[in-house]
Amino acid sequence: MSLLRAQGLTAGYGPVTVLNAIDLEVNEGEIVVILGANGAGKTTTMRAVSGTIPRSGVVEFDGHDISRTSPDAIVRHGLAQVPQGRGTFPELSVEDNLRAGAITRRDGAGAVAADLQRWFEQFPRLAERRSQRAGSLSGGEQQMLAIARALMSRPKLLLCDEPSLGLAPLITKELFEVIERLNAQEGLSVLLVEQNANLAMHMASRVYLLETGRIVASGSAAELSADDTIRKAYLGF
Amino acid sequence: MELFLQRLADGLSQGSVYALMALGLVIIYRGTGHLNFAQGEMALFCTYVVYQCGEWGIPIGLALPIGMVVGFALGAVTEVALIRPVAKKSPFAVFIVTLGLFQFLNWLDGAIWRDQPLPNSGVGSVQQQFPSLFPSKDTDFITIFGADIKLQSVGVFVLVLALTGALFLLFNKTKLGLAMNAVASNAESAKLVGIRTNMVLMVSWGIATAIGALGGVVFAGINHNVNLTLMFTVFIYGSAAATLGGFDSPGGAVLGGLIIGVIENMAAGYADEWVGQQLKVGVAFVVIVVVLLVKPSGLFGTAKVERV
């Protein structure tokens, strides 16, 4: 069943149209990866879905039409975004960052505290720094914090914008493992944007190839790797 | 020694008013990064409302909460109707709008509560009698180490401490406070965790103006009157206090206010022929300049820390 469906999604900045009527779908339990070069419109796609930039077209999420919904209301529907460049609250402590992630929840302080504990166990480095200001964390730690913060809202769909950006390969691998595990164990659906094709292809249920604001190919990871032209042009192997 | 203690007490109660003004400035600045030049005049409008309640026979204890509710509404409406639409265009425009609001409110006060010929000089100002929140007759004082400390000073000081405590709880223990801190830190990300940033900003302006109203009422009570120039210097001192404490630190704002109140009274008292009553405001400017030169983020402000 489709959890997220975008049809004719068009978006840009001021007079510049970056995204040209793309169609996109994420089914429940899927990890969908959007690949593309710099400037292809990957981040714009994420922003258009989460409503942080003006857009046109139809976006449906979990049975709701969210085409005109404000970003904060979209989060309350169960769609959380990890923005590019992490976007933590630098002046707030690690713990307050996570609490802010849970601010939309209505299931009581006990449940929030339990989740807090859970992510501290998942990311021990965050636990060590729970009272430190987020701005003083390293890049990898901030990326973990941003993902944990998004998960604190108990989303149905997680949007991840280039989680590997600026991270050491080992940490990236670790992050992707966490995402895969959440997907496998709890059925968390993920829409992931990546430049690092090799890594992302491994865990993708399906892949979209984005080129200058258009989707030029889509299919399972295996299908796309099998296509010689695509493989050479986008995957580099 | 007695004189010193009395000046200290006077300074602390004066400083309490500056602290309230600075708190309002800081709460708005944290949320939006704007310096609200109309803060003093918004407070004055509410003070006049409280004065009007008194004219209608409502006791000050009841009129004060009314004034603060009016303040909350005034702040919230200002944010939604004036600041938000303009802020989308340019931050500089907000500066102009708050300056305009400053002028407008002062004119409005004059139009409603009778005019005065020279609004900026205070000459010929219609000074309306204003009741004090605390006992303020000449006989209402307590004696500590031989110094006569006015009950009013004690009351004002305790009031500000209580408010500071309440705000501390708000910012550190409530969801609203967490949302306000998050918006202050990174408004874009605040939206992405589902915080209604517009609501938070509206409430911030409301709270800031309600606190301003309290400051205006307290200050009018200390002076026993309300007039159109009442808040001019208070605003300047309040800005100095916020600069000293750090523009993003509520606790710093309070401490900054108290320090400036004490410095002002000590300077005017001890360096009488040098500073005196006329040049007192200069003290605020000296503080602002020195702080900006030595520690631009203020005593408790956060210098931006960010690892990339």
Image (tube, coloured by chain):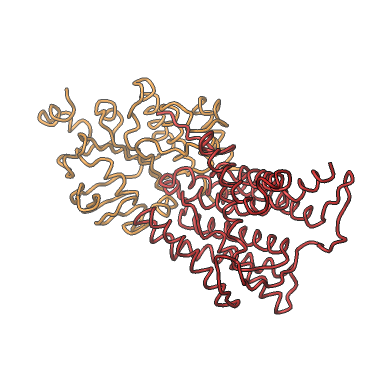
Q: In terms of image quadrants, where is residue B61? A: bottom right
At x 49% / y 52%, what residue is drawn? B35
Q: Quadrant of residue B5?
A: top right
Who's red, chain-wise? Answer: B
Pick out the residue farthest to the front: B273
Q: Nearer the viewer, residue B136 or B249?
A: B136
Q: Residue at x 41, y 39 (%)?
A: A87
Q: Position of residue A99 (x, y in %)?
A: 54, 41
Q: Residue at x 38, y 54 (%)?
A: B92
Residue A52 falls left or right of residue A108: left
Q: Residue furthest top?
A: A170
Name the residue nearer the viewer: B205 or A114.
Answer: B205
Image quadrant occupied by the C terminus of chain B: top left
Q: Position of residue B192 (x, y in %)?
A: 41, 46
At 43% across and 36% down in the image, what residue appears? A146
Q: Position of residue B36 (x, y in %)?
A: 50, 56
Vertically, is B195 above or below A166?
below
- Count up the numbered dots: 0
B11 or B40, nearer to the observer: B11
Q: Is residue B181 above or below residue B210?
A: above
Q: Colour of chain A?
A: orange
Quadrant where the N terminus of chain B sits is top right
Q: Residue furthest left?
A: A229
Q: Position of residue A190 (x, y in %)?
A: 35, 39
